């Protein structure tokens, strides 16, 4: 053999565009989902409950991953073994349906400055 995979040896493989129906963006603003945005499933969010035939099994996988604890978009991609672009599109679908909530990361401008952090550290050391 020359090292190439043929037929059954390759295992199950679906192209990313097939999972998203050729879409590169979800309806729920998936283009704004940072890798560190935290996603959590809404209580009672079940893929079969709505009976939407447009939903893929991967939507259910994402919901199952986010059911107990918030996960970042990057963690969802890693745990579901899906490309980040696909996860963003699928999360956009779930956002549109109201089945997930997304907490976007804090903007760097809103974080405390180095001066304040140094004062906190100095205050803690003084205790």
Image: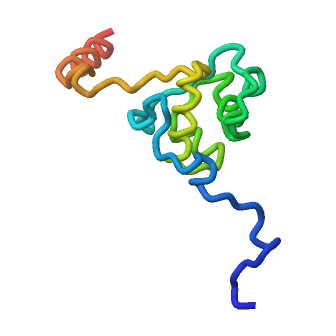
Identify the residue at the far top of this view: 127
Horizontal side of 84 relative to 47 (left or right) equals left
Please state the horizontal and vertical placement of residue 38, each as a whole percent of the image. 50, 27
Horizontal side of 11 relative to 78 (left or right) equals right
Identify the residue at the far bottom of this view: 1
Identify the residue at the far front of this view: 53
Q: Quadrant of residue 75?
A: top right
Please state the horizontal and vertical placement of residue 26, each as a whole percent of the image. 50, 36
Q: Nearer the viewer, residue 72 or 82?
A: 82
Q: How many marks?
A: 0
The residue positioned 20% from the left and 22% from the top of the image is: 113
Q: Is residue 97 above or below residue 124?
A: below
Please state the horizontal and vertical placement of residue 39, each as a whole percent of the image. 54, 26
Q: Quadrant of the N terminus?
A: bottom right
Q: Nearer the viewer, residue 38 or 31?
A: 31
Q: How is the image coloured?
A: rainbow
Identify the residue at the far left of this view: 115
Q: Is residue 118 above or below residue 31?
A: above
The residue positioned 25% from the left and 20% from the top of the image is: 110
The residue positioned 53% from the left and 20% from the top of the image is: 101
Q: Nearer the viewer, residue 75 or 101?
A: 101
Q: Quadrant of the C terminus?
A: top left
Please state the horizontal and vertical placement of residue 9, each as a whole percent of the image. 80, 73
Q: Is residue 105 above or below residue 16?
A: above
Q: Quadrant of residue 94?
A: top right
The residue positioned 44% from the left and 39% from the top of the image is: 35
């Amino acid at each position: 053999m020359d090292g190439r995979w043929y037929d059954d040896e390759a295992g199950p493989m679906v192209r990313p565009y097939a999972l998203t129906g050729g879409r590169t963006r979800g309806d729920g603003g998936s283009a704004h989902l940072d890798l560190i945005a935290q996603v959590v499933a809404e209580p009672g969010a079940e893929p079969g409950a709505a009976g939407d035939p447009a939903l893929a099994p991967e939507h259910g996988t994402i919901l199952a991953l986010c059911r107990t604890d918030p996960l970042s978009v990057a963690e969802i991609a890693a745990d579901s073994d899906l490309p980040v672009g696909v996860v963003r599109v699928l999360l956009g679908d779930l956002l549109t349906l109201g089945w997930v909530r997304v907490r976007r990361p804090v903007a760097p401008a809103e974080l405390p400055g180095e001066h304040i952090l140094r004062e906190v550290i100095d205050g803690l050391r003084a205790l």
